[in-house]
Image: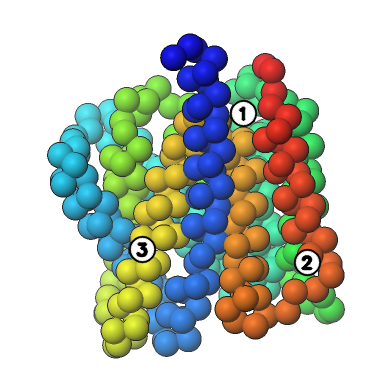
């Protein structure tokens, strides 16, 4: 296999993994909405989401006889990645208490811009096609997510949502650029992130003074927790690591537009939520921007 063929194959795998990461993460409402309506506290839901995903991934790695080892220098960075990803989830949920979820979604989708700026700081310059795709997808997200009517915007919610975007941005960049974890497999990297997140959420729940199984009363609750752990957590994290390493964090971030698109489609098709002309226009813009980035790759 020639070098160019191998590069093209990696690029294709990277794009497909980025789309899979976005679609799988966007399935959060499919499981999370039912859990919240059932009275499961957010920290309980987040703990089981990460803990169950870690167990499933560890079993999978054991069956495949993959190594769980990581060196001392690597472990510290893997824990940091876990804190960043868990922090992104946590700050997003907390932001909902201060601002509408649509506005929070819009602010969180600043992360492709943050990723691009971080890469520029590292003297790695995205192509003009990527910059144009970032601007277009952000415009599409504005159409999809901005609230209508009089909405009270509180500063803590804005700060938390932007904090969520920053955590996610640094996660993507470190996975792609760090030489320290370059030889760590995507499975091992994801496992350490999940375990770190589970420990963080269990600690916060303990400080809150509540039980870890509060609100989890039925088989349906457990089924939704398992679904939440596998699809938008384990699958999404694995695909995210593959995509970031193969096509870079900036393009992976742009492909994250499939997260809100999937969430909106789930809400429309399964929960009967309205799909307005403005939202349809936003979807069309986002998809066109992503296709433009994929079909017009940079020669740099």
Does 198 appear above or below 13? below
| Quarter of the image where one finds residue 189 | top left
The reply to whether discs 2 and 1 touch (Cβ–Cβ < 8 Å) is no
Residue designated by label 2: 279
Q: Which type of secondary structure does the marked residue at label 1 adopt?
A: helix
Residue 288 pos. (x, y %): 77, 47
Say which quadrant the C terminus sits in.
Answer: top right
Whichever of labels 2 and 3 marks the residue nearer the N terminus, that label is 3
Kindly indicate whether the residue at mark 1 contacts the one at mark 3 (C-beta within 8 angstroms).
no
Look at discs 3 and 1 and give the one toward the viewer. 3
Mark 1 Cα shell of 10 Å, populated few (<14), some (14-19), many (≥20): some
The percent position of residue 7, horizontal first and vertical second, equals 52, 20
Q: CA distance from mark 2 to mark 1?
A: 31 Å
**Residue closer to the observer: 299 or 169:** 299
- Number of numbered tags placed on the structure image: 3
Up the image or down, 72 lies above or below 142; here it is: above
> Dot 1 corresponds to which residue?
119
Q: Quadrant of residue 56?
A: bottom left
């Amino acid at each position: 296999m020639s070098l160019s063929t191998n590069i093209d194959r990696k690029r294709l795998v990277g794009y497909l993994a980025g789309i899979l990461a976005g679609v799988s993460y966007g399935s959060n409402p499919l499981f999370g909405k039912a859990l919240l309506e059932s009275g499961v506290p957010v920290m309980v839901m987040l703990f089981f989401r990460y803990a169950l995903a870690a167990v499933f991934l560890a079993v999978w790695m054991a069956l495949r006889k993959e190594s769980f080892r990581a060196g001392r220098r690597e472990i510290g960075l893997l824990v940091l990645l876990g804190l960043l990803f868990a922090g992104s989830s946590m700050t997003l949920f907390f932001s909902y208490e201060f601002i509408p979820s649509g506005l929070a979604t819009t602010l969180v989708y600043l992360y492709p811009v943050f990723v691009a700026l971080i890469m520029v700081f590292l003297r790695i310059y995205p192509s003009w096609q990527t910059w144009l795709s970032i601007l277009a997808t952000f415009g599409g997200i504005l159409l999809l997510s901005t609230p209508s009517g009089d909405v009270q915007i509180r500063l803590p919610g804005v700060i938390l949502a932007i904090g969520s975007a920053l955590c996610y941005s640094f996660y993507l960049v470190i996975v792609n650029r760090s030489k320290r974890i370059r030889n760590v497999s995507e499975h091992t990297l994801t496992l350490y992130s999940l375990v770190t997140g589970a420990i963080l959420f269990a600690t916060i729940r303990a400080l809150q003074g509540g039980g870890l199984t509060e609100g989890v009363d039925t088989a349906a609750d457990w089924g939704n927790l398992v679904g939440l752990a596998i699809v938008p957590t384990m699958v999404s994290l694995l695909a995210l690591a593959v995509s970031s390493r193969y096509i870079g964090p900036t393009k992976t971030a742009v492909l994250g537009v499939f997260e809100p698109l999937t969430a909106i489609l789930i809400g429309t098709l399964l929960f009967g939520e309205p799909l307005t002309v403005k939202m349809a226009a936003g979807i069309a813009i986002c998809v066109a921007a992503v296709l433009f980035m994929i079909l017009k790759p940079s020669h740099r």
